[in-house]
Amino acid sequence: MDWTLNEGFETPGGVMRWGSLGNGEPLVLVHGTPYSSFLWRDIAPALARTREVFFFDHLGFGQSEQREGQDLSLAAHSENFAQLLDHWGLSHPSVVAHDIGGAVALRTLLLEQKSYRDLTLFDAVSGGEWERGLFQLFLEHTEVFRKLPGYAHEALVAAHLRHATHTGFRPGVLDAFLAPWRGEEGQAAFYRQYSQIRQADTAAYEHLLGGIPIPVRIVWGREDRILPPEYAEWLHKHVPQAELHWIEGAGHLLQEDAPGRLLAWLTAEFASARAAGPVSG
């Protein structure tokens, strides 16, 4: 399907692109890195049958503006997200977040003090020791990676993207994810955003996780190689009131590996709501 974000939101660092579908109670989808809102191309229309669904590309990602000098830290992404919620006039939306989108959503809730109706985190950066592997190399050797020949950079990014899916991409999908990171400007943008994502920005709210006052659902791909299952268990330990659900035979990108099963959890009633029973208004 055509995935064009027709709306823009001006931030100090540039224009963020966003879109919405449907009518009903608001639900916001938050992507991670190195992805974009294109991840939601199948999920958003399905959710929009009963909800008003909002989606966007973080600054520096996808169809949003990329340029030197942008603040692309998790703290800055959270501030942008908080301002975007205000721009939309959403005071109490449901939020669904993936990868570093989880950290953005948590910072916005706990430090920017925005209110959510409920929060679903899946295969999400949340806290603990997550500066590791290739990501750690990006942090330590940013200038080396920025100087890679274009063909080597593209091969590395493609391999990194493939590593995130357990079942493989459908035709054309890998190219869509690669597009924003191609060419000299795209290559610079790729390492610019990775070089600014730091564990310190999640450590800042870890002590608040146990007091989250809203329903929280954790969903995780059992075959996730980017954030293996122990990261789900860490999050559940720190948010003990949350539900935890596993999706077998799926990796980091549940949107690609198991969209139907992910959608089932995104449309299911929270366990806390079921336990509470009907509420009279």
Image (spheres, rainbow, N blue to C red):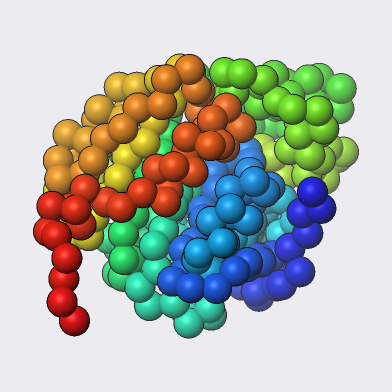
Residue shown at 79% from the left, 39% from the top: 176
Is residue 137 shown left or right of residue 120?
right
Is residue 74 shown left or right of residue 173?
left
| Residue situated in front as seen by the camera: 23 or 218 | 23
Residue shown at 81% from the left, 53% from the top: 2
- Give how far across and how far down residue 18 sits, in percent: 66, 65
- Give how far across and how far down residue 132 sits, in percent: 44, 23
- Give how far across and how far down residue 109 sits, in percent: 32, 62
Image vertical order of residue 197 relative to residue 91, above or below: above
**Quarter of the image where one finds residue 53:** bottom right
| Residue situated in front as seen by the camera: 6 or 194 | 6
Q: Can residue 107 be seen in this view?
A: yes
Residue shown at 49% from the left, 43% from the top: 263
**Quarter of the image where one finds residue 55:** bottom right
Q: Is residue 14 visible?
A: no
Residue shown at 57% from the left, 27% from the top: 257
In what quadrant of the picture does the C terminus appear? bottom left
Image vertical order of residue 239 relative to residue 93, above or below: above
| Residue situated in front as seen by the camera: 239 or 9 | 239
- Give how far across and how far down residue 261 sits, in percent: 47, 34
Total labels: the figure holds: 0
